Amino acid sequence: MSLGWEAALDSCLRLAEPRGRESVPRAQALGRILAEPVVIDRDYPSGDLSMMDGYAVGAATDQPWRIAGENTPGHGPGEPLAAGTARRIFTGAELPAGATRVLPQELVALEGGLLRVTEAPEGAFVRARGSEGRRGETALFAGSRLTPADLAILATVGAQPVIVTARPRVAHLVTGDEVMGAGERGEPGSRIRDSNSDLVAAILRGIGQRVREHRQVRDDRAATDRRVAEMADLCDVLLISGGASVGDHDHARPALEAAGFHFEAHRLEVRPGKPIGLARRGRQWAVALPGNPVSHLVALHVFVLPLLQVLEGAPPARTRLQRAVLDAPVVRAVPKRDTFWPSMARWSDEGWRLTPCRFLSSGDLLGIAGADALLLLRAGADVPHPGDPVFFLSLAPEFSNP
Ligand code: AMP
Ligand code: MG
């Protein structure tokens, strides 16, 4: 029985359990999900610091002041401020005891060694101790995916190592007697080079992950059973390229079932990619992916990336569709299944604009050169024309750890 692809994906994502946690050096934490809150180790800033080059003075307004001493960054507060004096101070230096504000040097005049304000300063120009964070408070919350700004925060609070969620280990098995290595020449005809292994590797690299193991197997039931059984024991997610459908030479499903996987969804109402199947064995997942390269690409983005996100501990996220305006005609007939049409997205002053690629069939890999988006055409909905609003899924990596 076929199921709506969104309902099928949602129900699989609800069944997917995150993998746990691990500790990584700060330098490897970019794009990872924090498994524990990060706590501020001391008041921030840890002293009262000047925000400007100028002069530190007390609360009293009895100018002029005599200048006594100099505070530079990293050298402490120095002697307390004596009555009637101002301290020369620089950005980032600690204020002396008794000082409450800094007069920026642009707003004062020095005459005969005496300091006067020439223009009333707006503000005290002091970052007070603890004003940005107190020791023990939370700097970063569990569940956040670490951005470059977050990494700077980890450095500032001295967090090392960092406790993040573990990422699923992914393996990729290529099936097909016709498939040869990407470096092979082979006889022309029905033999084709393997492009799916490079595709999966590149998509995973885009999100800071890698394929732990790439293997290949011929279209033979016993050989596929053996290969699936041994690979499944070494990974959290086994991706199988090809043989996903129900033909006489399609062994992905029977081999996965023989290895103890249960299909939670199979043959979904989506184009390209209908043969896709998602199977589970306890906390492990296997995805039977259509071998056709364009279907492989669509299925990886629409089904596998959300699954990897949830296994990594991110909240289940619906396929994130964005709005665009269609730039060129796409299809003439209303699609019978929801269709992801490979396209190129271009940013303009009015937002995203989408140009559909040539897409003769799900084998037409050459037609999708430059594709960085999938235009979603809903089954039964009116065919969009140039200038019409449309929705698309971006193929650009959303989370990374290069
Ligand atoms: P399958 O899903 O096994 O029925 O394969 C469908 C079609 O996808 C095959 O006829 C091949 O042309 C193509 N194909 C299968 N595996 C690969 C691969 N690894 N790389 C490129 N194309 C493939
Ligand atoms: Mg095949």
Image: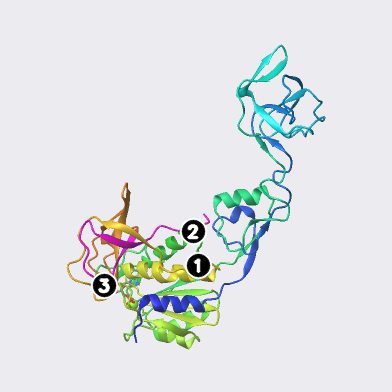
Report the residue marked by disc 1. Answer: 309
Q: Which of the 4 image quadrants contains residue 200? A: bottom left
> Residue 261: which disc?
none
Q: Nearer the viewer, residue 393 or 131?
A: 131
Quadrant including the N terminus: bottom left
Residue type beneath disc 2: Phe
In space, the residues marked 3 and 1 are separated at their CA atoms by 36 Å
Residue type beneath disc 3: Ser
- Residue 149, image x and y in percent? 57, 49
Segment tinted magenta in the rendering:
373-402
Sooner in the amino-acid sequence: mark 3 or mark 1: 3
Instruction: Say if 19 sits above or below 394 in the image.
Output: below
Q: Secondary structure at mark 1?
A: helix
Residue type beneath disc 1: Gln
- Name the front one of labels 2 and 3: 2
Residue 194 visible in the shown view: no
Report the residue marked by disc 3. Answer: 190
Report the residue marked by disc 2. Answer: 399
Q: Which of the 4 image quadrants contains residue 297? A: bottom left
- Residue 13, image x and y in percent? 48, 75
Contact flag, marks 1 and 2 (Cβ < 8 Å): yes
Mark 1 sits near ligand 1, with its Cβ under 8 Å away: no
- Quick check: which quadrant has ligand 1? bottom left
- Name the front one of labels 3 and 1: 1
Mark 3 sits near ligand 1, with its Cβ under 8 Å away: yes
Name the main secondary structure of what is drawn in magenta.
Answer: loop
Q: Secondary structure at mark 3?
A: loop
